[in-house]
Image (spheres, rainbow, N blue to C red):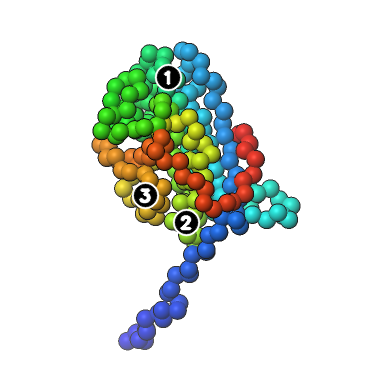
Amino acid sequence: MSPRRDPPSSASTKLADPKRFDPADYTVVTVHKEAKGLVLGGDPEDFIRYFKASLHPYDPDAEEEPEQREVVATVRFSHVAFGAWGGNGRSIKFDFADAVSGELLEIADALFDDEHGDTREELDVSGAGADLLHIEMIEVTPGYETFEVVRYLLAHILERYGHGCMGAVYYQADWESIGVARPLKERCFRQLRTKNRQVWFVDLGRVQPPLDEKATESPTSEE
């Protein structure tokens, strides 16, 4: 007969409380890959500028570079120059978006009513032009306050990199919404349903979220 085993105590099974997030204790490092240039007749990838932002503990006395410290969170995003492409008389959806990825095609189909950059009337977009800030991926290291970290990084990215864009989107599978939906709503994103996934969209003509918390930022570098 096996010996009786008592259930583990609550003290041994309780998850540790997440680390409190204070933006003043962290720094954001952003790297970018330059687009080749908005050239008439250029390839679709020439009209996209890719970025990666990472959040790290801030220590002004540390000898190592910020990006060599612990990674608290990572966001990959891009500036998609839909406006310049459509201005050349080519199809935004099929000549551009579909040539880049199925994901970008779904986003373009959710936002644009025609091939040349007119947004869908029901979206009532007030932002000028057709350029878009595309947030491709958000990851937060376990043990940190996901809501506060994502909320801060969204405001940081929209404020610093949303200029010249009519809106910003985050494209996700349903299972990816855990921990991300709440800060997206906090930053005024709304859901647009596509065939396969959800597109979260914010009209930057109506919303330019101020940074209500200040973190330091290391100089942007190029990959």
On residue 185, the disc is: 3
* Of the pair 125 and 220, the residue shown nearer to us: 125
Spatial separation of the CA atoms under disc 3 and disc 1 = 30 Å
Quarter assignment of residue 53 = top right
Give the mark nearer the N terminus: 2 vs 1.
1
Q: Secondary structure at mark 1?
A: helix
Nearest to N terminus: mark 2 or mark 3: 2
In which quadrant of the rendered image does the C terminus lie?
top right
Give the residue displayed 49% in from the left and 64% down from the top.
18
Task: Tell me the residue that label 1 is attached to.
Answer: 85
Check disc 3 and report its element: helix, strand or loop.
helix
Q: Residue at x 50, y 33 (%)?
A: 163
Identify the residue shown where x is 73% and y is 56%. Answer: 61
- The kind of residue on which mark 2 rests is Glu
Q: Which quarter of the rendered picture does the N terminus lie within?
A: bottom left
Q: How far, Cα to Cα, is label 2 from label 3?
A: 13 Å
